[in-house]
Amino acid sequence: MLRLIPFALVLVSLGAHAEPLTFAEAQKKLFTLYWSNRNQTTFYCGCPIRYQANKMVPALKSCGYQARKSPARAARIVWQHVMPAVDFGRQRLCWQEGGRNSCAKNDPGFAQIEGDMHNLVPVIAEIDRDRADMPFALWDGQSGQYGKCDLVVDFQARRVQPPARSRGAIARAYLYMAERYQLKLPLPQRQLFESWNSQYPVSEWECDRDDYIADVQGNHNRFIQQQCH
């Protein structure tokens, strides 16, 4: 049974000079970070990110990505919550009163969680749509749904097997969110993420990104930071 958290109890303390960010504000800050570090790639598929005006687009040919169903969505990049909004939202009272819209209007604590940059990553929009709020899992899923991108979506069983390249970062995002916002993770999921955290160590980019977010948002992801220093 989920523990429902009153919104007044979850305005988490940030750094002395930091303000909580909305989801829209967080996206703008992250765009600035990625624009300043032009050699970055999409989170799951490793497609080089290109910039057109104020938009990020994936270089699909460079990574061998093939659209599963929607070429239009495959040509865009969006910011995805690694831990989906439903996972942290449904543990809050506002979600029971009207879902995400109710939380956005009535719960400043939800807005802070939604805008936490440690939980936001750039992904191909088709992947974002297909993943939706499905949990991550590990089985013998065979890739090929998206060309050379190794992500596998089992639509019938409602689960997603992420590529090895993103498993460590996924784990550290989930463990951070659960700890910082007092969220419950099912034991099998927590055990999987603890295993991935150990098996897939942080990259130099994860450390740099964590430092940038801490400067803007006022706090580190300790699961990243403890491996960086």
Image: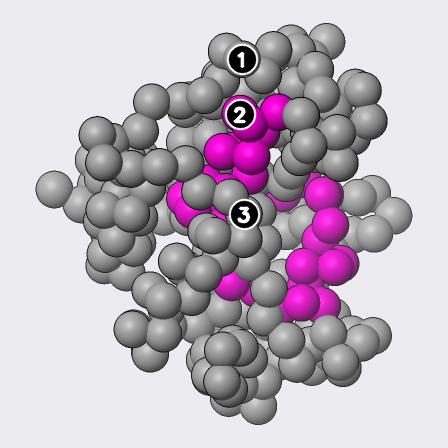
Label 1 belongs to which residue? 8
Residue at horizontal 23 percent and vertical 36 percent from the top = 17
Label 2 belongs to which residue? 109
Whether residue 44 appears in magenta in the rendering, the answer is no
Residue furthest to the right in view is: 156
Contact between marks 2 and 1 (CB within 8 A): the answer is: yes
Q: Distance between the residues labelled 3 and 1?
A: 19 Å
For numbered disc 2, what is the local secondary structure?
Answer: helix
Ranked by sequence position, the earlier of labels 3 and 2 is: 3
Amino acid on which disc 1 is placed: Ala
Ranked by sequence position, the earlier of labels 2 and 1 is: 1
Above or below residue 227? Residue 15 is above
Amino acid on which disc 3 is placed: Phe
Residue 85 quadrant: top right
Q: Give the range drawn in magenta.
A: 107-136
Q: Can residue 147 be seen in this view?
A: no
Amino acid on which disc 2 is placed: Gly
From the viewer's perspective, tell me whether residue 208 is left or right of residue 68.
Answer: left
Label 3 belongs to which residue? 23
Residue 19 quadrant: top left
